[in-house]
């Protein structure tokens, strides 16, 4: 539920100042311009404007629960008209009852009814407009806050997930490869330990909000690919196409690794043949475009429906970071699966 | 003399097992296989006593390969990390080796097998292991079957329905029917419950294939599938279907 505008002291002061100003003007109109006696002018002012306060409070509370949506403004107009009519009627008969012995005033009252109605219409209209705008804004603020909270939660969870998913299989299999190399090729083993350490340090140090250059991300991917190549031997070949014009472009840290990991897993486990993973970076209308390609077997895999965990979280992350969808696309061409990532540049 | 096979897709992982084996003069390594297909072929041709088997492998994983064998040999798993699998191994496998493992750990697994072999229980153990695996809470994405000498991988979306057929389950897909030596309850527990419903004691139906459900005799219904097939729906099956379909 939205909070009413009357919750804040500042608003109450503003409202009462406006009301006092309006009441004073109203009194001046009756007392100075229409030359009514001071007592009668005061009674009329208080009665009319006291009702005005009650009516406004009522309206503000109505709109707290009922916020007119697009296309229902007709109801709003009907509501305002009904309110004004009611107010005018109470003023008309109430004042006539209080000041029943003053014929001259009664005559004035009856004469002024149409003006009073017009006035009521304007004032209730203003109050209704103000309330609607206020509550719409409140609702918007609440939604924004909720969205921010949800996104933050999702972001934290995703990053956590990413790290969790990355570690066990990759890490233990890499250690196993090192263990195998240690006996026969200790130099190779040492090199792989170095690469694995650099890679792990990279995942630990980076914060997922941070932007890094494509050159840096590529270095990091390279480490990862080298380790995987040692693990899978001749079955895995990689091809990286990236011109000098892309090196300084920026992208969120740790974004691409899950995509490449996914491509390798998908490629290597979907066929028994040797595979090539391609990473192609280009620049296109101020966007860094990265394509990651892997082969797959259309007979047994459904790229659209499978559990490609990496892609949905990457897609989500791009959406959270750039506030728009469509930055991750996939394409299937014969037995090649392509993931296309677009990174808008500042 | 003990005849063994290594089945693992990573060359270095095979290399280290080979190295460890070379310290055992009583063990002969028959062949190294780099995937489940090669593994199956080698097992059928060479009849090893024991295999060292990785789980995550291309096309068909270690468990799927074992499922396809009529007489699986004794198995020592070599795997990196799989929480669920570890549980299963603890109860039924001869042993499991978590990568990376040492020569001592490897020797221990081998002597464990030699002890068990003298008790003649290793084959039963592998079957028991497979039964435990089939109760895994993980949802199956595909079903692997053997048709003649060929191995067929069926994505679960392609399954229309499953029907009990003596000791087998008949899997009806767009490409025809396949038999698998499993129970209905195995499929009921491993297939995605939001996609597959046991509509009848002898039938499990893919709900995305259902076009409508008609009353049939008293208390019973019959589901019409897109393919034109009809699947009986019992009273309890009807209740389950209604729940999953949200009606």
Image: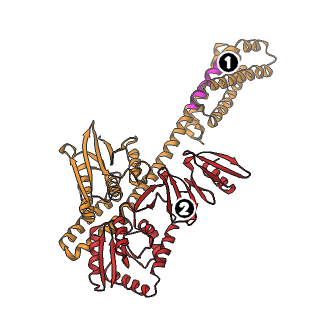
Q: Nearer the viewer, residue B97 or A289?
A: B97
Asked whether residue A23 is in view, the answer is no
- Tell me the residue that label 2 is attached to: B169
Residue A10 is situated, as x and y percent measured from the top left of the image, at 54, 38
Q: Main secondary structure of the magenta part?
A: helix
Chain A visual colour: orange
Left or right of A11: which side holds A321?
Answer: left
Q: Residue at x 55, y 31 (%)?
A: A133
Residue A117's tag is 1
- State the image coordinates of residue B246 (x, y, percent, origin top left): 62, 48
The question of residue B84 being in magenta is answered with: no
Where residue B219 appears, x then y in whole percent?
A: 73, 52
Shown in red, the chain is: B
Residue drawn at point x = 28 percent, y = 76 percent: B18
Q: Which residues are magenta?
A: A116-132
Q: Residue at x 33, y 80 (%)?
A: B3
Of helix, strand and loop, which one carries label 1?
helix
Cα distance, mark 2 to mark 1? Answer: 82 Å
């Amino acid at each position: 539920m939205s909070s009413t505008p009357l919750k804040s002291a500042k608003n109450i002061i503003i409202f009462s100042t406006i009301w006092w100003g309006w009441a004073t003007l109203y009194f001046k109109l009756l007392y100075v311009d229409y030359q009514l006696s001071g007592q009668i002018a005061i009674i009329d002012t208080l009665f009319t404007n006291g009702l005005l306060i009650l009516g406004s409070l009522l309206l503000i509370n109505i709109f707290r629960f009922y916020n007119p949506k697009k296309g229902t403004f007709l109801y709003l107009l009907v509501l305002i008209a009904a309110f004004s009519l009611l107010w005018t009627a109470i003023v008309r008969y109430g004042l006539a009852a209080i000041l029943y012995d003053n014929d001259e005033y009664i005559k004035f009252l009856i004469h002024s009814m149409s003006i009073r109605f017009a006035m009521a219409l304007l004032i209730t209209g203003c109050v209704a407009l103000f309330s609607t705008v206020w509550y719409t804004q409140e609702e918007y603020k609440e939604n924004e806050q909720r969205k921010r909270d949800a996104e933050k939660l999702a972001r934290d969870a995703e990053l956590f997930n990413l790290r969790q998913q990355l570690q066990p299989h990759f890490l233990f299999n890499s250690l196993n490869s090192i263990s195998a190399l240690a006996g026969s090729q200790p130099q190779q083993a040492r090199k792989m330990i170095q690469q694995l350490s650099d890679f792990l340090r990279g995942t630990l140090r980076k914060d997922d909000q941070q932007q890094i250059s494509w050159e840096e991300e590529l270095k990091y991917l390279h480490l990862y690919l080298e380790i995987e190549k040692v693990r899978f031997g001749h079955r895995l070949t990689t091809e990286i196409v990236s011109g000098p014009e892309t090196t300084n472009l920026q992208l969120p840290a740790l974004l691409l690794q899950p995509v490449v990991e996914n491509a390798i897993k998908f490629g290597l486990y979907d066929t028994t043949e040797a595979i090539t993973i391609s990473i192609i970076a280009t620049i296109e209308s101020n966007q860094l475009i990265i394509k990651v390609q892997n082969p797959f077997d259309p007979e047994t895999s459904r790229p659209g429906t499978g559990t490609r965990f990496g892609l949905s979280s990457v897609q989500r992350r791009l959406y959270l970071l750039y506030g728009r969808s469509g930055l991750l696309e996939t394409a299937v061409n014969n037995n090649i699966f392509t993931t296309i990532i677009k990174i808008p540049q500042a | 003399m003990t005849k063994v096979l290594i089945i693992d897709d990573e060359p270095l992982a095979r290399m280290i097992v080979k190295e460890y084996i070379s310290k055992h003069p009583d063990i002969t390594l028959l062949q190294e296989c780099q995937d489940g297909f090669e593994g199956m072929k080698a097992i059928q041709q060479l009849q090893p006593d024991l295999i060292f088997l990785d789980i995550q492998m291309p096309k068909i994983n270690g468990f799927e390969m074992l499922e396809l064998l009529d007489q699986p040999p004794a198995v020592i798993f070599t795997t990196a990390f799989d929480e669920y699998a570890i549980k299963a191994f603890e109860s039924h496998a001869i042993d499991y080796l978590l990568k990376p493992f040492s020569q001592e750990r490897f020797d221990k697994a081998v002597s464990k097998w030699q002890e068990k072999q003298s008790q003649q229980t290793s084959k039963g153990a592998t079957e028991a292991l497979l039964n435990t695996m089939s109760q895994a809470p993980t949802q199956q994405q595909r079903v692997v079957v053997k048709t003649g000498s060929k191995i067929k991988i069926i994505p679960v979306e392609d399954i229309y329905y499953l029907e009990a057929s003596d000791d087998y389950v008949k899997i009806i897909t767009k490409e025809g029917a396949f038999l698998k030596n499993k129970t209905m309850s195995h499929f009921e527990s491993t297939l995605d419950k939001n996609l597959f419903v046991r509509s009848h004691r002898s039938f499990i139906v893919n709900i995305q294939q259902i076009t409508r459900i008609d009353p049939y005799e008293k208390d019973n219904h019959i589901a019409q599938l897109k393919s034109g097939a009809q699947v009986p729906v019992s009273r309890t099956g009807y209740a389950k279907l209604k729940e999953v379909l949200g009606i």
